[in-house]
Image: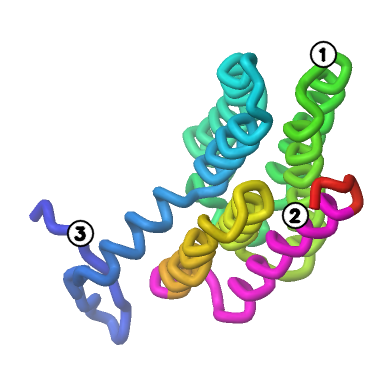
Amino acid sequence: MGTEKKLYQQTSEPIIIPLDWRDKSARVISNLFSPPLAALACIVVTALATKSESSLFWILIFIALLIIPPTLFVLTLVHRGKVSDFHLNIREERARPLFAIFAYAAFIFLVMYFGGAPRLMLIVTAVALLQILLVFIITLKWKISGHCTSAAGLAFLAVALYGENVLPLTLIVPLIAWSRIRLGRHTISQTLAGSFLGAATVIIILYLTNVL
């Protein structure tokens, strides 16, 4: 009874098929590399790259202000039945939460800017803001993969900051794309679009700010 199951409705009688290892693996991967956790990894990667004595302080500040509140916000929406699940899998339910998160993150960006946050961390926060805004705009008409956007952003950010030694990290992008497709959350084109968006925003912003 405790086994996870998929439910398929073919006729009037439901057919229950147990989840195999691929489904379970896809779910674990999808949860481990959710956008909030990818954002957390970006913060740590960026703060360590600054090689500042205050890196730990800024990591904690960014987590407290930019990771925890949006996460609790979405969890509250799920609890109140405003959205179906934490990953916002239904496109029509995404727009309002995404816009609210963007507005909040933009405000926190200004707070961090005037609070003297390290330049590199502000730049990466600007990348995240741009990603959220573009995903929001695209979501109004089409469903793009936020998981792949954040994962590609993380991977290319790490490569930009630490060089070719971390190039294998880019392999997480197709892995996450597979998990989202396997779970039926996205199509191939939606994961490709998300991956391109995540990589492009990082490369463009880092280039324009002379980080690359």
Residues at marks 1 and 2, CA–CA distance in whole angstroms: 24 Å
| Any part of residue 195 in sight | yes
The nearer-to-camera label among 1 and 3 is 1
As shown in the figure, which amino acid type bears the numbered disc 2? Val
* Residue 115 disc label: 1
Label 3 residue SS:
loop
Label 1 residue SS:
loop
Is residue 50 rendered to the left or right of residue 34? right
Q: Residue furthest left?
A: 1
Quadrant containing the N terminus is bottom left
Measuring from the top left, give residue 202's x and y in whole percent: 75, 54
- Taken as a whole, is the magenta stretch helix, strand or loop? helix
Q: Residues within 10 Å of mark 1 (few under 14, many from 20)?
A: few
Region rendered in magenta: 182-207
Q: Residue at the spot x=49%, y=71% of the render?
A: 174
Label 2 residue SS:
helix
Q: Residues within 10 Å of mark 2 (few under 14, many from 20)?
A: many
Measuring from the top left, give residue 187's x and y in whole percent: 55, 78
As shown in the figure, which amino acid type bears the numbered disc 3? Glu
Q: State the residue position of label 2.
A: 202
Q: Residue at the spot x=21%, y=78% of the render?
A: 15
